[in-house]
Amino acid sequence: MKKHIKEQAFDKASFKALVIKHLVTTYAQDTKTATDKSWYLAVGKALAEISTGNLLATEKRVIDANARSVNYFSLEFLIGRLTGNNLISLGLYDQISESVAELGLNLTDLLEQERDPALGNGGLGRLAACFMDSLAAQEFPSVGYGLHYQYGLFKQSFLNGHQIEFPDKWCEEEGYPWEVQRPELNQVVGLYGDVSSYTDENGQQYDRWNPAVTLQGIAWDLPIIGYNNQSVFPLRLWECRAPEPFNLAKFNDGDYIGAQQAQIAAGNVTKVLYPNDNHHQGKVLRLTQQYFHCACSIADIVGRHLKKGHKINALAEFETIQLNDTHPTIAIPELMRVLLDDFKLCWDDAWAIVSKTFAYTNHTLLPEALESWSEALIGELLPRHLEIIFEINHRLMADVEAKWPGNNDIKRKLSIIAEGQQRMIRMANLCVASSYAVNGVAALHSELVKRDLFPEFDALFPQRLQNVTNGITPRRWLKYCNPQLSDLISEKIGNEWPANLEQLEAIAQFASDDKFQQRYLEVKKTNKQRFADWVADNLDIELDINAIFDVQIKRLHEYKRQHLNLLHILSLYHRLLNDPSFDMHPRVFVFAAKAAPGYALAKDIIYAINKVADKVNNDPRLKDKLKVVFVPDYRVSLAEIIIPAADVSEQISTAGKEASGTGNMKLALNGALTIGTMDGANVEIREEVGDDNIFIFGLSVDEVEALKAEGYNSHTYYEQNGLLKASIDLLDGDEFDATDCAAFANIRHNLLEAGDPYLVLADFADYVDAHNRIDTEYRDQKLWVHKTILNTALVGKFSSDRSIRDYVNNIWHLSALPK
Ligand SMILES: *Cc1c(COP(=O)(O)O)cnc(C)c1O
């Protein structure tokens, strides 16, 4: 079967010719005067040409193999820059580097020209991107389905310490070189309107949805290039173009204005990504995006299935759909609608397919993030889907009645419809009731899903609730972002580890080896210098690379507790100024975080950190012991510079609140030691690296629960801990030249009067202790580097290749493409 694979023949001369062809004919530039930007576009386009051929060839191999595929549905894919990573996957990095050098160019500079396609918010979107990479690396037949937002997550900058947001038009005027349109895959999607019944020629009665509005879905494919294989799978992103004029005849006069408004709104469906992370926003446009995404994707899957010559009844044999959180849940009633109304299956036959097609990943227990939509809104936008949801619920309630006769409490808990002033559709309940598998994203989180969120569903559907611990792709998060450490590792254990991360364990034997330690330290220093140079160039702050680089990079959220980190910094500031006996190793605290534009307290925390940074960075009394750097506009390409430079990884969420985290994995892999709570995947990182090689602190999930049950009072901690009191009081004074004092007062108010909902004060003392241990241990460089090497060596479990194999073996049950 080897015949399918052509060796990736690479001929420098023809590649250079291809680049010049694109430069001149695609981008209309002159080779003498073209900018780096145009050269990057031309190189990207030339490479994309190679990968598009492989994309089509892989599609054919999937058909020839009669293979079962997974369809990964996600409203977000935070893919990061593609060019550098794709060069690594193609195995062409060095050759292309030489080729562009011969054109008088520097590849690193060209790669810097690419904008991050920021089509996601944070961890959830980045997970989808890592999963696509791991599916392709292991050649599991797969399609990623997402939206082609015109504006990705906003660009962040700071003005006098405040976050300000700018639109991020990631797709240049010239277009993004890696994407290709697939016009034959375009779709038409309906919205609004009504449902009517009719009797067909055989006397059978059916329902029909008569949408009042139709939208056009334009298919864009981004190539996901398999590492070291010739397979390329599509990430298919739907763009909503101007809707087709609606059919007046179908529509009654009274709703004319409403339909017009809908028409206008429709043109904007894929304009922007919603900038919320772990927060539900019940806006019509958001639901429209979700439905548009699902309708296009379901139609694409069904169309592909039929085109292969399969019967519709065999859909679940050949296609499975993984829902990344509840955002694409409307795909469930959409597939039911297609099967019932278009294919005219009876309910039981349709349900037999649907209930074997979907699997759902839960990402959060935070109540404010659990999606629910008003029944009235769904009824207006998607009247047929609402009927179908009612019928699914009716049957679910019958199952509940059979298991717990007469128990209305359980019915109320499990019902897809929440009663109340306005009835709401709970998307997570719909997912659990309709999916053949449901998974949490780390062992602890999955236990809490069973114990706290869905215990009755676990009893009703035994085995349905499972765990798949998240992972990260070692190609981007080690080989690409940390080339020097990668080379050092390859020198010792060979170069198979990027596709087999467990092999890293073999470097544990060098953890005490003087020479290896020395070289590992040299690499870390180089990476710290690279980041320090970036900070000097971009933020005009001088950093000493002998300081401890202590980083917290993630979305800004109360549960992630950047304000706990801030209080610790304030405590150091206080001690440096007031306690002559206090000594500390120099520390650089690095933050990077965007706050959702509507999240006031998160923005106050950003402002406070920026103001504290201004002060401590310029206070000569601190003798450069303390620096605080808030890097604006956190994104994948920044993570790639910060992570290899980190000594300490802050993973300090309130126990029970962070489902998994993946930043924790990236940092440990690159040799940062974690200071963290027993939350999310920190628990499993500790299991892998051992208690001596991680700094665990704070309350456990059970302790958090017990403390809340007995009545948590943050004032007690404030009154009883002098250092804590001094640190919080710093937020009150005029120490930090804050023109917007309300921000400081709001944080203080949240921690004291508002009851400190995330137990910052309860964990403060233990957190400070853990930091004191870090200070002591870092001074012993031999001890520190030993722990650091063991972190790199022992986190192989967190490769997303392993996560994907868990999905394949326990949930999807599909096979890799034959070679
Ligand atoms: C990995 C990553 C995240 C997730 O970070 P957590 O610490 O797990 O919340 C968010 N944003 C970007 C750009 C990332 O690369």
Image (cartoon, grey):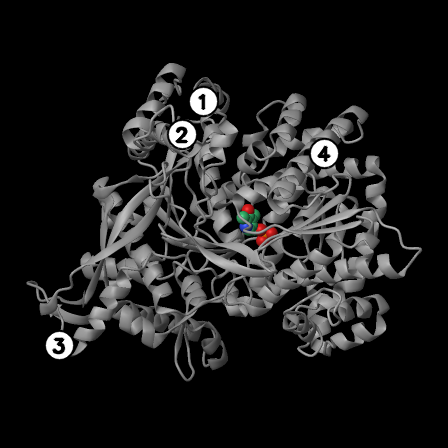
In three-dimensional space, the C-alpha distance between marks 3 and 2, rounded to whole angstroms, equals 55 Å
Q: Name the residue under label 1.
A: 100
Circle 3 crowding by C-alpha within 10 Å: few under 14, some 14–19, many from 20: few
Circle 2 crowding by C-alpha within 10 Å: few under 14, some 14–19, many from 20: many
Q: Are marks 4 and 1 in contact (CB under 8 Å)?
A: no
Whole-percent x, y for residue 35 in the image: 41, 31
Observer-side mark, 2 or 4, equals 2
Q: What element carries label 1?
A: helix
Horizontal side of 734 relative to 109 (left or right) equals right
Q: Name the residue under label 4.
A: 525
- Amino acid at the residue labelled 2: Trp
Residue 39: which numbered mark, if any? Answer: 2
In front here: 527 or 195? 527
Horizontal side of 708 relative to 65 (left or right) equals right
Q: Are marks 1 and 2 in contact (CB under 8 Å)?
A: yes
Q: Is residue 7 above or below residue 809?
A: above
Mark 4 or mark 1: whose residue is earlier in sequence: 1
